[in-house]
Amino acid sequence: MTFNISVHRSWWREHGPGCVRRVLPPSAHGMVDDYTYVSVTGCIVDFQYLEVIHSAVQILLSVSITFMSLSDQDCL
């Protein structure tokens, strides 16, 4: 998650379910690699929600794996 504090964009913004990504030609010379010229339409779910769900799944997995490893040590 970038929290809109950097120039990097979310991967989910352009690759979410149903999203159609279209690269628009730059209006000025020398600005070919700028991400501002990417148009995304048709997304089923906003990328902010997908980022929150993705983060929540990662947290749940890490907590459950930690508890499973701690419970395995108790059996020894």
Image: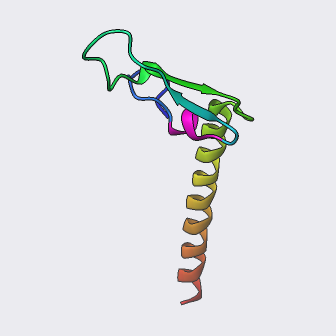
Residue 41 percent coordinates (x, y): 65, 26
Q: Is residue 49 or residue 45 the one in the foreground?
A: 45
Residue 61 can be seen, yes or no? yes
Residue 4 appears in the figure:
no
| Residue 15 location, quadrant | top right
**Quadrant of residue 62 within the rendered picture:** bottom right
Image side of residue 29 versus residue 75, left or right: left
Residue at 66% of width from left, 43% of height from top?
A: 53
The residue under the point 54% across, 75% down is 69
x then y, percent, for residue 59: 58, 52
Q: Is residue 70 magenta?
A: no
Towards the viewer: 30 or 69: 30
- Tell me where the magenta segment starts and ends, as one range: 11-16
Outermost residue toward the bottom in this view: 76
* Residue at image point 56% right, 33% down: 21
Residue furthest right as drawn: 44
Q: Residue furthest left?
A: 30
Q: Nearer the viewer, residue 62 or 39?
A: 39
Above or below, 67 against 21 in this view is: below
Residue 76: x and y in percent read 53, 90
Q: How was the colour assigned to the protein in this rendering?
A: rainbow
Majority secondary structure of magenta residues: helix
Which is nearer the eye, 10 or 40? 40
Q: Is residue 12 magenta?
A: yes
As drawn, 54 above or below 2: below
Residue 1 is left or right of residue 6, and the answer is: right
